[in-house]
Amino acid sequence: MNTWLKISNGVVINVVKQDATPPDDELGAWVIQTHPMQGPGWFYDESGVLRRPLDQPWFLITKSAFISRFTTAEWSALVAAADGNQGVKDSFSWLDGVDKVALPSPLARQAIEAFVNSGCVARERAAELIVPARAGEEAETAIPTAGGEEP
């Protein structure tokens, strides 16, 4: 079963989930959804690219953007603490294995908690580390197809 987006005047106006492509009509045409967040309000350009509205929060950022959210002093302290603090070491291992960070994910939250518990990051800074993506921090993603490959 696929999820279909109805496009009218370059904007997604409806979403349905069904096997067959819905019929186009005077209101617009249907395209297949390529990302689980795509829905009403997203923009569709003539090249077939769907873009999210700029006011929609995005919580998937690049690893480098995540690391850049820490101050130099915090990051230096974390690197130094990784030898003796298992929580920090485990979090670095997790971060080493990713190229994107989903900020609301349990693993990201566990890493931030470990960084706070180590004393390297102040508790009040934790909330600043999980705010939605800022300009230039967003990571792209795609949903897997039935064959397991990204579209």
Image (tube, grey):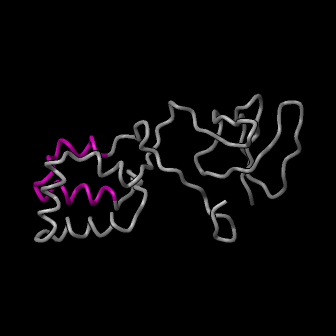
Q: What is the x, y in percent for residue 113? A: 22, 56
Q: Residue at x 12, y 56 (%)?
A: 77
Q: What is the x, y in percent for residue 112? A: 25, 55
Residue 110 colored magenta? yes
Q: Nearer the viewer, residue 67 or 43?
A: 67
Q: Is residue 113 above or below residue 23?
A: below
Q: Is residue 90 left or right of residue 49?
A: left
Examine the residues drawn in magenta and state their main secondary structure.
helix
Tell me the quarter of the image containing the C terminus.
Answer: bottom right
Q: Residue at x 74, y 41 (%)?
A: 47
Q: What is the x, y in percent for residue 133? A: 41, 41
Tell me the quarter of the picture where residue 125 sits.
top left
Which residue reaches farthest top?
9
Q: Residue at x 57, y 33 (%)?
A: 53
Q: Residue at x 16, y 50 (%)?
A: 74
Q: Is residue 103 above or below residue 24?
A: below
Tell me the quarter of the picture where residue 24 sits.
top right
Over which residues does the magenta segment extend?
108-129
